[in-house]
Each structure stands twice: as structure tokens, then as C-alpha cells.
Amino acid sequence: MPNPCPIVLDLDGTLIDSAPDIHACVNAVLRQHRIAPLGLPRVRSFIGGGVELLWSRIMAACRIDPAHRPELIAAFMARYHDATALTRLFPGVTEALGRLADDGHPLGICTNKPMGPTRHVLQHFGLSQLFPVVIGGDTLPKRKPDPAPLRLAFDQLGGPGLYVGDSEFDADCAAAMPAPFLLFTGGYRLKPEAELPHLAAFDRFEQLPTLVADAAMTRPA
Ligand SMILES: O=C(O)COP(=O)(O)O
């Protein structure tokens, strides 16, 4: 692994708490179709595998006729594209990313969120300049937990490195590469921390630069 090593980060549930916006967009679409709204914890538990899987889970939960799927997803995407009003950065994210960039780590994003809303939210929070590489859920035919998007991110950043994420999708993707995985425990994970393969875990972003430095020391060059 080069030093300072590339670092790829997940977006939803890792850098940003976007569940309230996703929840609002989902319920606006359900309301339009006279379907009872879903609670925030339920919608949050459906996030992580991208828009297609999100809607498969919503349609199963609400027993919606599959024939409505294309129009529901289209209506959702129209709202989701620039939905940032309810989204927040997790505390300490900007400072931690700034510190990693200052230390010379090439930074990238590997998310299952489609590229349109990904670009929009990064710009909204003034983070676009920090990430020379951004891989979205629609960049390749396959999404996390398939390792292809993460592999592409590291290839574009110039070599292997660390992956930082919050969910089963992220942990399984890193394990499939394989890449050392740092788990943020404050996101949208459903399983207990011990069931997700990870090198180290953290619950505050102030801890991330130290974990990255420790990981670099314990890994072969
Ligand atoms: O769009 C999603 O379902 C989640 O995206 P993520 O990969 O940034 O967690």
C-alpha cells in the first residue's frame, strides 16, 4: 500500500445522514399514489443497496403491484436528484477529511447512490474538490457488495488503500476486494458490529486520522 495511502469513503450513513431526505422523497411518492407513508427507521433500514433495492424493499413492505415500479422510481428520482434540505454531515466529517487531504491521502467516494444526487450533495456541502474520484451506484453495471466499483475507485486513485463505510454492503464489498475496512458505527448498519468484517471501528470522525495512521503502520507496504 502506498504511503500516504488512497482512502475511499462511502457516502450515505458514513459522511452524510441522508435518511431524512430519502424518507421524505419516498413518502411524497407514496402519498401521490395514495399509499400509507413509512416511518423513518423503516426507510433507513432499506438504504444501502442503491435505489433499485430501496424500491424493491418499499414495494414488498407496502405490497405495491410491480407494474407501478418504473413510474414510482421515476417520481422518486425527480425528487431525490437535488434533495439536501434534511441531510446533514455527521459531526467532525469536514475536519477529518481536511486533515486526511492535508496529510497527502488521495481521497475517493464509492457509493451506491446514483451519480446525479451524489454530485449534488457533495457540492452542497462544499466537498467536491476533496474527491478527485467519485464512483456512484450507476457508474458500473454492478453495485456494492460487488467489489467492482471499489476496485475502480482504487485504480483511479493510483493503488490499493483503505475503505471507510458504515454498512453490510460496504463491509462485504471490502472483504470481496479484499481491502482493509474501517467501520463507522454511527450509520445505517443493521447487524451487530462484530458480524461485519473490519480492521477497526470508530464512532466519532475525530478518531479517523489516527485509525488511518495505525492501519498504515500495521499493513505491509
Ligand atoms: O443509495 C444507497 O442505498 C446508499 O448509498 P451508500 O453506498 O452511500 O451507503
Image (tube, rainbow, N blue to C red):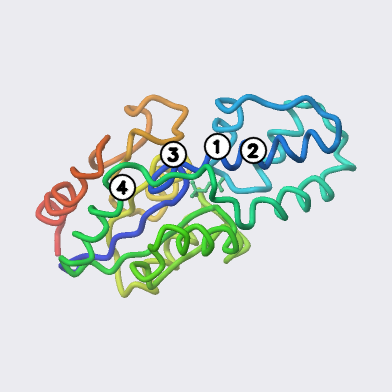
Q: Position of residue 50 (x, y in %)?
A: 60, 48
Q: Are marks 1 and 2 in contact (CB under 8 Å)?
A: yes
Q: Position of residue 217 (x, y in %)?
A: 9, 54
Name the residue that disc number 3 marks: 167
Local secondary structure at mark 4: strand
| Mark 1–mark 4 distance (CA, rounded to whole Å) | 26 Å
Name the residue that disc number 4 marks: 181
Name the residue that disc number 1 marks: 20
As drawn, 156 above or below 216: below
As drawn, 141 above or below 39: below
As drawn, 155 above or below 82: below
Could you tell me the amino acid type at mark 2? Ala
Q: Nearer the viewer, residue 78 or 164?
A: 78
Q: Are marks 1 and 4 in contact (CB under 8 Å)?
A: no
Q: Quadrant of the N terminus?
A: bottom left
Which numbered disc flags the more N-terminal residue, 4 or 3? Answer: 3
